[in-house]
Image: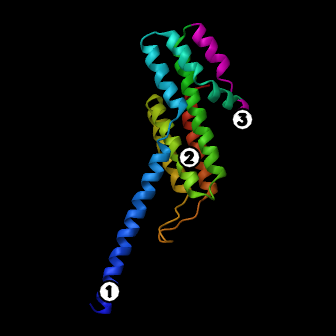
Amino acid sequence: MNRVGVYQVVGRWILVAVALFSSAMTYAYSYAAAGKEPVIDGREAILLALEKQDFNAVQQAVGDLKDEFAYLKKEHNVDLQTPMAAAVANQDAAQVEAIMDRAVVEEIVRRLDGASKNLADYQVAKVLVVKSKLFLDLITPKLDDSHRQQAEQAIQGTLQAIGNPGVFGVGQAPADPEAFKQQQQLLIDAISTLHP
């Protein structure tokens, strides 16, 4: 085999290795983004219990969210536990659901705040934005058309604003903190219409 043939074989192996590496990285992001999320699981359990008008099950599912509600109160000064306790005691299904929507909004805000503080670390920022999208998908059906479109465009905007490390430097793009901040605010404005 002549020198050109050797280079062609080596080049093909490098391309295969890059393709495998890229698909492994994509899998890693999707796997990390799909981890257990107590608020998502709790919301699902609460909504199922509300459908059955089983407020004992609602109360149990709410109890399972004690740590998440405590975190939001301590770190973000958002008290969901007090209104939730009142809503469950009054068996006010609409209010319970509205409070869970607020919990989802707060989780999106929390993840995007985390991403904005970690723009220097592409992997961390991307996982946090992808997790925000998991939460966003739960509430977009409740938004009106214009706010839904705004939210969907803004989440894509935050994803673009975190940049791209590229593969071996090819396709590399730096994070854009100002663009991220703008898209983050557009998203928060859109989803905040779900609660006063």
| Mark number, residue 55 | none
* 77 up-or-down from 124: above or below: above
Kindly report which numbered mark, 2 or 1, lies closer to the viewer in this rendering: 1
Residue 175, located in which quarter of the rendered image?
bottom right
Residue at 55 percent across and 41 percent down: it is 187
Tag 2: Cα neighbours inside 10 Å, few (<14), some, or many (≥20)?
many
Nearer to the camera, 22 or 125: 22
* Residue 146 picture location, percent across and down: 47, 37
Q: Which residue is mark 1?
A: 6
Q: Which residue is mark 2?
A: 128
* Residue 158 picture location, percent across and down: 54, 50
Q: Residue furthest bottom?
A: 2
Mark 1: which secondary structure? helix
* 15 up-or-down from 164: above or below: below
* Residue 17 picture location, percent across and down: 39, 69
Nearer to the camera, 104 or 31: 31
Marks 2/3: CA–CA distance: 17 Å
Residue 9, located in which quarter of the rendered image?
bottom left
Residue at 48 percent across and 51 percent down: it is 29
Part of the protein shown in magenta = 74-90
